Image (spheres, grey):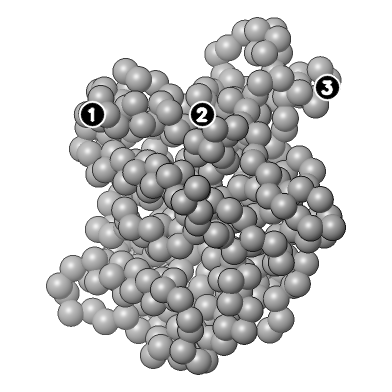
Amino acid sequence: MQFDPSAISPHPARLPYAALIKMRRLLRTLYRLAQRPAYHELLCDLLPETARFDPGHDAVMMGYDFHLDADDTPQLIEVNTNAGGSIYAYKAAFPEADPDLPLPGHFPMRFLASFREDFRRFAAGSGLELGLMVILDEQPLEQNLYPEMYFLRNFFRSRGLPTEICDPAELQADATGVFLKGRRVAMLYNRHCDFYLEQAELAGIRAAYLNRSVCLSPNPRAYGLLADKQRLALWSDAQFLRDAGVSSRGRELIRELVPHSELFAGQDPDQVWSRRNGLVFKPLTLFGGKGVLMGKSMSRKRFNELDPHNTLLQRLVKPSLSAGGAEGEMKTDFRLFVYRNRLLGVSARLFQGQLTNLRTPGGGFARVEITRE
């Protein structure tokens, strides 16, 4: 399976070490917040059943996306629970990497260890073993990042974990468990974008998840606590953070590194329109940059069409720039791949235009060079 060369940049992205340290401090602060009972109580009425349910384990491959401001201070743009691109970034750093052979660098074994640990937490001393794993996505062959799933399937297999790639329709699932052609599935590596398991085609998986009959990772609870865009608005509320038990130092770090965000609902549209140039408008229920609008380039007609109940207003933070060779400077964002409070790896995406994409000549996922300047 060949990786699309246009999705992998030949140019590196430079990340100051001091910025990386701040990023890591923030992800650890947010992870501690997500463990607090007071935080759970404050969110209880905002979460659907699948997110209120605690499956007893965490979420593999969380992604924290950042821009760097003019002073190289990282700004958290959003959190993801089905973060993709890790293998594209890995291939940018190690183009000859073969999943059937020993792989260079630290990331592959950190990645594998996170899956084994998450299943151990799910099993909780029950004696269950990590057997068949399924990489789950909607029509995976049609996904832009399918080559990444293919690489990971072969990587897991070569390390002794039987693994398949499946659409939900290929599985048989109910409260008793998830099965593929009669074989019980022990773990679902969930790359599907129905984060709360609300679609009818996921009803069986939902039942198995709520009955703890399958290890689903990432899962709705991780999404509800950290990745639902509505959480960004709550993290911009100092009183909410105090009520959740966040220390003054933690609140200051969040204030510094999380651009102010607020829900559009309940606000005066004319007042929002007057300050649109400094805002990004994000739909709450879409993903991957879909539907994101820059206020400075939005028409009044398009503004009037926005659904306030499905829109987040976030302070605009322009992405930093990386050298792109003959193609010119590239806008840059950074993604930290995380398990629990541990950093697994760092990637960058280089692009031109309004939003990240995999079509910019010379752009795509890039290796990251940590600088100590």
Q: Which residue is mark 1?
A: 247
Q: Residue furthest left?
A: 125
Q: Amino acid at mark 1?
A: Ser
- Rounded to the nearest angstrom, the CA distance separating label 2 from label 1 is 19 Å
| Closer to the eye: label 3 or 2 | 2
Q: Which residue is mark 3?
A: 299
Q: Amino acid at mark 3?
A: Ser
Q: Earlier in the sequence, mark 2 or mark 1?
A: 1
Q: Amino acid at mark 2?
A: Pro
x and y, in percent, of residue 263 in the image: 54, 23
Q: Compared with residue 87, is residue 159 higher up or lower down, i.e. above or below?
A: below
The image quadrant of residue 49 is: top left
Q: Nearer the viewer, residue 101 or 138?
A: 101
Mark number displayed over residue 369: none
Q: Residue furthest front?
A: 373
Q: Is residue 225 left or right of residue 102?
A: left
Q: Residues within 10 Å of mark 2 (few under 14, many from 20)?
A: many
Q: Compared with residue 91, is residue 345 higher up or lower down, i.e. above or below?
A: above
Residue pictured at 59% horizontal, 64% vertical: 367
